[in-house]
Image (cartoon, grey):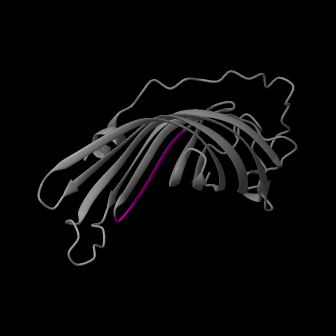
Amino acid sequence: MRTATALSWVGALLLSLVSVGALAQPPMPPSPAVEGKTPESNPGRRHFIAMELGGAAFVQGVYRFRALGPLHLEIGAFGAPHFLSGSLGTTLGTLIHQRWFPHLGVGVGAAGGATPPDECAAGTSPCSAGTTDTIYRYARAGLGVAFGAERRHMIAIELAAWRGREEKTVTAIGGSMTSTSRSISWYLPGVAYQFAIF
């Protein structure tokens, strides 16, 4: 299926440039285990996991790595019967006042699904099965709110713009195949839960 190839394809990721000088971030309050460390030796958490519904993908689990300052790199994937999706992207965001996390992101993604045979009434044309593959690039903006004693938990809302292509293939039981392709331009709202690992 084209989706397996699409999920392994890595496109050039566009990087959004934002000014963060005005968003001065006070240091995270140290946990009891690291109170003796200086801010230089404890720069902040770098590894995060998340679950997203909408935004960069229809649905996916995400690993996010804070690479440098406000720059995060992320990879997401999800699999279920008759459905696969994945994405690669970057996010620029910083925590303000130990709570608010405004962010911008760009990336590429792919999703594919298989349609089970249609239910046909007796005496009608043969049933058919099909696949739908979507390859896209996205840009998104969102706002998260961190909570919990150490601000490890975060809920975020987002809005993403997708641009790409959708291909549908229908195969009849007799073996004949019909394919259609169209450009897509979608706006997808999303919600996400994130947990800071360390």
Residue at 82% across / 40% down in the picture?
27
As for residue 132 lying within the magenta part, the answer is no
Picture coordinates of residue 162, whole percent (x, y)? 55, 37
Q: Who is closer to the viewer here, 125 or 34?
A: 125
- Left or right of 33 in this view: 4: left
Residue projecting furthest to the bottom = 122
Q: Who is closer to the viewer here, 91 or 96?
A: 91
Residue at 69% across / 32% down in the picture?
70
In the picture shown, does residue 48 fall above or below 17? below
In the picture shown, does residue 78 fall above or below 1? below
In the picture shown, does residue 168 fall above or below 195? above
What stretch of residues is rendered in magenta? 74-81
As for residue 78 lying within the magenta part, the answer is yes
Picture coordinates of residue 135, whole percent (x, y)? 41, 38
Image quadrant in which you'd find residue 92: top right
Magenta segment's dominant SS is: strand
Residue projecting furthest to the front = 123
Picture coordinates of residue 100, whole percent (x, y)? 82, 46
Residue at 75% across / 44% down in the picture?
37
Picture coordinates of residue 119, whole percent (x, y)? 30, 73
Residue projecting furthest to the left = 174
- Left or right of 71 in this view: 74: left
